Image (spheres, grey):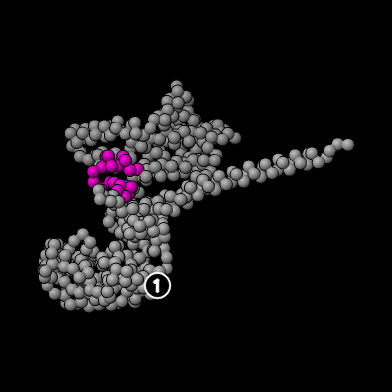
Amino acid sequence: MADLTTPLKSSRHYIARDILVKAALYLILVIGAVIAIIPFLWMIQTSFKTYGEHSTRTWWPAGLSLTPYQGRPATQEIVIPMQSAEGWRNIPRSFNPALEGKITINQVSRYVADRLAEKDFSIPFDVLILATDTTDDGIVNYDSYRLTVDSRIVEQFTTRIDGNEMGGPNFNALSVRGRWGPHIQVSNPDPENFTVKVTWSIWRMLFNNFIYAWKDANFAVFMFNSFKITAITIVGVVVTSTLAAYAFARMDFPLKNLIFTGYLATYMIPGAVVLIPNYLIIVGLETFFTETLGIANAWYDNWTALTIPFMINAFSVFLLRQFFAQIPDELYDASLIDGCGHLRFLSQVVVPLSKAPIMSIVIFNGIWAWNQLQWPLIVTSTERWRPVTVGLTSFISEASAETQLIMAGSVITTIPILVLYFFTQKTFTEGIATTGLKG
């Protein structure tokens, strides 16, 4: 009699092995995902730390806990008697006599009180404010202020606030100026009725690094430059890649395959190899435009050097060419009967059918253009056209690197890319999934 249990055991063996293989694959994928996301999470976490928290390897930043925001004193406005500033050292230039006043802080939040107690720093304490007039217009209009704690010396750690800005003094216990309060803002600069607002702003407590990074590194200018550079590069790449891909996919001309092979071969050349030749070309063009045409900075320190060399992309041409090759010839024959030429067929038929791969090109080249660092440093010398990635280097000095500010700036630079991908994810995925398929 045959043993009927043998096939059953064999079946169970294969099922168990299949389960183990799938479990191992899922485990590898989960571990890979965790490893990939750890740097991103570390970047976000560090962006909320103070300099001291990062230096002492504090695991969790206080800014992401409830402790600093509990027991905050109420906002109050104080009228400060102002008098001539005497005994101050390093007073900046003022077109009217500099004035000084004293702000007495009688109450702080619970978190600040605990930090002060650790340093034996007593409450109340006085914050001295130095008011200067930086505009030479013949009008008494104080617009720049320095905050110190019981000190009449304007130095590196003195907090400066301008106009309606908000800032905090650098008192003994807290190394980050104005992070946890008190936050001071001049609400009325009239010397006869000089009024300041004393508050504890949750916005500034939580996003202090981001606010400081945006102001100190001039991120508004850098971000705008990056947007312009990225937009110009994307437009150039889409136009050149679409025309080249259509020619390789839909038109016949001598040595087409050989030219396309050579074109793809350029994608194998490392970027570092062509860095110096590209730079020498830019220098030559700049010299020609300056000496022959009398146009200075036509290439160097301008958008032309940052975008034009990268408007031709072999990978983008290859991606679009593979998709254009799928479009049935019957569509072109029908369009030809209606009187369409190649250019009209491309603009009215091919491009509308190719939104997915074109969007993929936009995302790939947008990310690449946004993240440029080395090339902009070489071909620019001022902030006029430098992108946001260069702005991050302003937090690195010979003495040290302010990592918490670098991470805050990195988060700011990442947001536009995440927003772009969020709104184009479906189209991007379709473009990658369908490119190169026949049918």
Give the percent coordinates (x, y) of residue 85: 13, 70
**In the drawing, does residue 237 fall left or right of residue 161?**
right
Question: Magenta includes 385?
Answer: yes
Kindly tell me whether residue 330 is visible in this rendering: yes
Give the percent coordinates (x, y) of residue 125: 24, 74
Question: Magenta includes 300?
Answer: no
Q: Please, what is the three-letter code of the amino acid marked with disc 1?
A: Gln
Kindly tell me whether residue 197 is visible in this rendering: no
Label 1 Cα neighbours within 10 Å, binned few <14 / some 14-19 / many ≥20: few
- Element carrying mark 1: loop
Vertical comparison of 280 with 56: above or below: above
Vertical comparison of 108 with 313: above or below: below
Residue located at (36% from left, 73% from top): 110
Is 121 in front, or is 316?
121
Q: What segment carries the magenta color? A: 372-394
Residue located at (28% from left, 58% from top): 215
Q: Quadrant of the N terminus?
A: top right
Vertical comparison of 168 with 357: above or below: below
Residue located at (31% from left, 50% from top): 392
Q: Quadrant of the C terminus?
A: top right
Residue that label 1 marks: 70
Is 358 in front, or is 141?
141
Residue located at (21% from left, 33% from top): 287
